[in-house]
Image (tube, grey):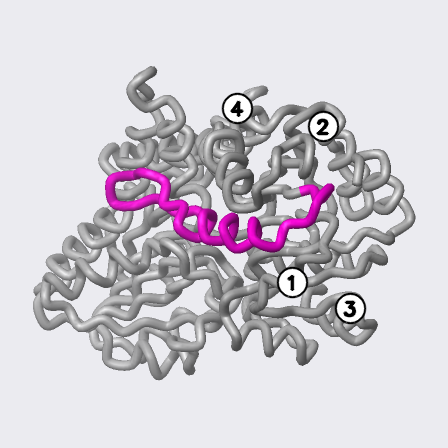
Amino acid sequence: MSLVELQNKIERRQAVIGVIGLGYVGLPVACAFAEAGFSVIGLDIKPHRVATINAGCNPIEGDEPGLAELVAKVIGAGRLRATTDYHEIAQADVILIDVETPVNRKHEPNYAALKSACRSLGVVLKNGALVIVESTTAPSTADRLVRPLLEEIAGKQANVDFYLGACPERVMPGKLLANLRAMSRVCGGGTPETAETMITLYRTIVQADLDPADCVTAELVKTAENAYRDVNIAFANELALACEVTGGDFAQVRNLVNKSPGRNVLMAGAGVGGHCLPKDSWLLAHSVSGRALLRLMSAARAVNNYMPQHMVNLTTQALRQARRKMAGARVAVLGYAYLENSDDTRNSPSLPLAQRLRELNARVVIHDPYVAEYRREVFECVKGCDVILVMVAHREYKTLNLAALKSALRTPILIDGRRVFSPAQAKAAGLIYYGIGWGGKPD
């Protein structure tokens, strides 16, 4: 099948689409294409997830507007079905790869899932199929890893027997469908004709700009945008640390700085988590390893990785003020997901925080309304604690009655890692307050 024939099938909604990986990216993508009129086959290695989706249910438990309804709709219409068997996507004209691409402890890409997907796909890949990597990868991964692996396993030649592209996802938990539809995409193709075919495909679900490029440009854009955000968050965090020491208030300083044209200081916080930001700078750096020295992004990573430890330091200071020691203290950590109103715990800053607190012999209790393991009544969780430590700005926490929380505590300490509460609110409730970027005198 030629690209012209494939474009015609896409325009007539006759192309069969396969989606490998039905997580935070793959599931909404599969549902969106199914809603657009395509027959979609979703593949995942987790049988329970496959069964849940085939039952018309959404396996993602966080607050995802419209996703549960859309899963039920497209499953009910017979437009989407899920499977664990790669042979069922042998008929697919377009295959999207949406698998995890983490980094290891040495900050090197761990492409085990990507390689496994390519090997299994290569066995069943049909002639004329278009393979698009939506996972975020180090620049040149499509050309140096995916293409040769598919060619080897499938016994086919790229741009002749099959086509290859890279179109990294641009979504975040809590806004999966909204981002999918409204965020621009870079359609990187192995050839210009492949890129144009990709634009034809994505135009059926994306309402924003679709820009043609080659694969490496698409990969560079995605890793660069996340590295850019990570660096800017690191600046905000360092500014917050400076405010604490000098007696300033980061919230006020940020607001006043941002009144100047072209300034946009981001929010400081207790740490950076998720699947993308903690690793995409390393993916970008890996692509030039040994050929260029990138200093800024690794420095930003060090700053952001330090913030959970800083929360521990603030906790130690507050306990000392209350004439208590960390050893034996009971600390309630509010929030275990990495992002507000989400169940996504990948690379959550709460994990190293809790580990460090336990190393210091504190007794840690964790609450999170979106994570099943920690979902319980919040006042029962904090009862008898010495510290409430806010790590995530879940909407449920923003409406908490601080006076009622104070009455449940053994020691009235609030450490606010997301500035959910103001120092004035804490003072009115009779709480000892420490917060990221708050340099005022603790009460």
Q: Which residue is mark 4?
A: 263
Q: Earlier in the sequence, mark 3 or mark 2?
A: 3
Work out how far the residue at label 4 is from the one at label 1, CA to CA, in angstroms: 43 Å
Q: Secondary structure at mark 1?
A: strand
Q: Earlier in the sequence, mark 2 or mark 4?
A: 2
Work out how far the residue at label 2 is from the one at label 1, CA to CA, in angstroms: 26 Å
Work out how far the residue at label 2 is from the one at label 4, CA to CA, in angstroms: 27 Å
Q: Report the amino acid beneath label 1.
A: Gly
Q: Quadrant of the C terminus?
A: bottom left
Q: Report the amino acid beneath label 3.
A: Val
Q: Which residue is mark 1?
A: 42
Q: Secondary structure at mark 2?
A: strand
Work out how far the residue at label 1 is from the one at label 3, CA to CA, in angstroms: 12 Å
Q: Secondary structure at mark 3?
A: helix
202 or 249, which lies in front? 202
Q: Report the amino acid beneath label 2.
A: Asp
Q: Earlier in the sequence, mark 4 or mark 1?
A: 1
Q: Which residue is mark 3?
A: 74
Q: Is residue 95 above or below residue 63?
A: above
160 or 253, which lies in front? 160
Work out how far the residue at label 3 is from the one at label 2, CA to CA, in angstroms: 28 Å
Mark in the foreground, 4 or 1: 1
Work out how far the residue at label 4 is from the one at label 3, CA to CA, in angstroms: 44 Å
Q: Is residue 114 magenta?
A: yes
Q: Is residue 279 above or below residue 50?
A: above
- The percent coordinates of residue 276 (x first, y second) are 46, 44
Q: Earlier in the sequence, mark 2 or mark 1?
A: 1
Q: Residue at x 22, y 71 (%)?
A: 364
Q: Is residue 434 above or below residue 253?
A: below
Q: Is residue 335 above or below residue 11?
A: below
- What label does residue 211 carry, if any? 2
Mark in the foreground, 4 or 3: 3
